[in-house]
Image (tube, grey):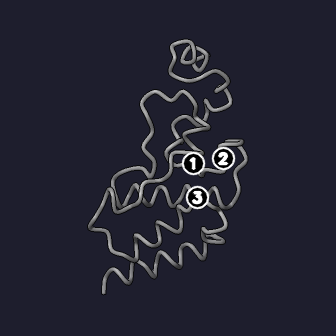
Amino acid sequence: GVTRAMVNEGLFGEGVERWAPYQDSLAWMAPELAEDPSATTTATDLFAAAALCQQLFTERPPRAIPAQVLDPAAVVARVLPEPPRWAAPHLPDAITAWLTRALAIDPAQRFDDAATMAGALATALNAREE
């Protein structure tokens, strides 16, 4: 269908049919999804939530995606999230630290669960107001 036409036009590399449902989500996907974009876990969901927060705080997605993506898996695996301060140098340290941890490449360095992540964000937001 549409993906095959896009491959034929050179917009995506061969074998990207499995990526078609995820094409609009590359900027927000956790790096570990490069192997299998459907293998979501709590860690990948938390990464996506943090990516949305980065978009809200900085007005930019966490990862810059080229206009023509030839290898979606490589983009997810190798294009690292931009440090929040690149897009928003005015961001308070507490928010920057929260985003950095929440968007860590290694899932083990991220928050363990949504409650912990939400609590840490509340703390960061309160620190911002002081």
The residue that label 3 is drawn on is: 105
Q: Residue at position x 38%, y 61% from top?
A: 84
The numbered mark at residue 95 is none
Residue 127 point in image, percent of width and height: 37, 84
Q: Which quadrant of the figure contains the N terminus?
A: top right
Using the image, determine if residue 110 lies above or below residue 33. Answer: below
Asked whether disc 2 touches disc 1, contact meaning CB atoms under 8 Å apart, the reply is: yes
Mark 2 neighbour density, 10 Å: few (under 14) some (14–19) many (20 or more): some
- Amino acid type at mark 2: Leu
Q: Residue at position x 36%, y 75% from top?
A: 93
The residue that label 1 is drawn on is: 29
Q: Quadrant of residue 75?
A: top right
Using the image, determine if residue 89 lies above or below residue 80. Answer: below
Residue 113 point in image, percent of width and height: 65, 71
How far apart marks 3 and 1 lie (CA) works out to: 11 Å
* Mark 2 or 3, closer to the camera: 3
